[in-house]
Image (cartoon, helix red, strand yellow):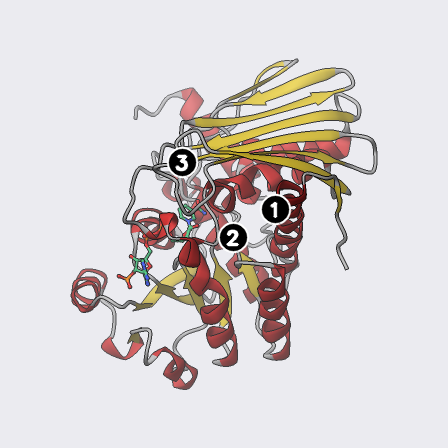
Amino acid sequence: MKNTRRNFLQKISIASALVPFSNLKTVANIENNVQETLGEKYEGKKLRVVLCGLGSYATNQLLPGLKQSQMCELVGIVTGTPAKKEAWMAKHNLLEKNCYNYENFDSIKDNPDVDAVYIVLPNSMHAPFTIRAAKAGKHVMCEKPMSMNVKEAKEMIAVCKANNVSLSIGYRLHYEPFTNEVMRLAKDKDFGKVKFVDGKFAWKNRDLKAWRMNYPLSGGGAFMDVGIYCINASRYATGEEPISVTAQAFKTEPEIYRDIEETYQWQLTFPSGAIAHGMSSYAFNAHKLAVHYENGNLEMQPAYDYGPIKGNTSKGPMDFPHTHHQTLMLDGIADSILNNKPFKISGEEGLKDQIIMEAIVKAVKTGKSVKIKYS
Ligand code: NDP
């Protein structure tokens, strides 16, 4: 990309998106070497991270995020595939003593050169590996959905607390500038109160053999996988927690989505009177967030994937930089851990979504409105 004025302005706005990280003046951008442009480099202690589960998301998103991160460093792996262990050790200069499999993972407790474990496994393995990592005294970063159910989520939080380690859930959008603007509008009310939120996330999943199609491993279907983005979005777009829900399930292709959910839609009510509609599916594609305020509207599409995210408000196009979400998130989590700052995407944040998801499933099963209780 040429070094145009727009690129320069983008770099400045990327840097300003980092204001919360007081000691961080730079940010990785997949197109620009911002660090070099701003002439600043983080020289402090880095969080030494082990990636657990070397599948698609770990390899294609979190690995580049760790490489570009200022405050994290990949020091090891946990994998059940011996060939991956050899390949990753060679390619990323990893020491054998920092590489584990699922059986010997607990011995990580004796490894002083690892600070944190990032769990990127099928959903059913999130709770067991979070608990094992926490008992080994390591900080935990865990992918969404944090667990299969509320009970597991509460146990994960309790075990991390008991072992004095942090728990963060991989809600990368909480560090993404377009999404931060949605959150700001809920707080500053430029367009008045939020009246209605509409979130849709669907993708065509035809991979019948993958864990996502296997209920015991996934805990559901599209709803667990991507519906969670719409639930989380309805919370950050309103700045409120929903109090009741009605919901419906549909299968347009029951022969494909035999054991898991295909299409869900739900309606949430919020204390202010705001309403949110959500939809998730594996049968088609949709990536949209719309927020309707008293005096204006916002629409983002795509709103949840790795970007570039695009959006408009009643005031015109949303003009924010395209950032590498995982890099920003990893630096944000590391900043919280290393500098004792509040966590944006804590286990408690994940637990709220799990509580809402469980209420939605109950609403589908009963066909009735379900009150959402957080304690
Ligand atoms: P993949 O199937 O690509 O990778 C999962 C990895 O887990 C495998 O490669 C394997 O790694 C390991 N694994 C261990 N046991 C099993 C098993 N029984 N079946 C399958 N894999 C197993 O999944 P994704 O990377 O797409 O998803 C992993 C997690 O990341 C999920 O929780 C998902 O929700 C989340 N995710 C989050 C995204 C985000 O934007 N935040 C985007 C995509 C996914 P190995 O060979 O090393 O043992």
- What label sits on residue 254 in the rendered view? 3
Q: Residues within 10 Å of mark 2 (few under 14, many from 20)?
A: many
Give left or right: position of 96 versus 76.
left
Element type at mark 2: loop
Q: Position of residue 42 (x, y in %)?
A: 45, 56
Q: Which residue is mark 1?
A: 361
Q: Nearer the viewer, residue 61 or 342?
A: 61
Q: Which mark is in front, 3 or 1?
A: 3
Q: Residue at x 38, y 62 (%)?
A: 73
Q: Nearer the viewer, residue 296 or 33?
A: 296
Q: CA distance from mark 1 to mark 2?
A: 15 Å
Q: Nearer the viewer, residue 122 or 175?
A: 122
Give left or right: position of 73 versus 169.
left
Q: Residue at x 61, y 58 (%)?
A: 346
Q: The disc labelled 1 sits on which kind of residue?
A: Val
Q: Which mark is in front, 1 or 2?
A: 1
Q: Nearer the viewer, residue 108 or 282?
A: 282
Q: CA distance from mark 3 to mark 2?
A: 24 Å
Vertical side of 130 occupied by 358: above or below: above
Q: Which residue is mark 2?
A: 145
Q: Position of residue 126 (x, y in %)?
A: 47, 63
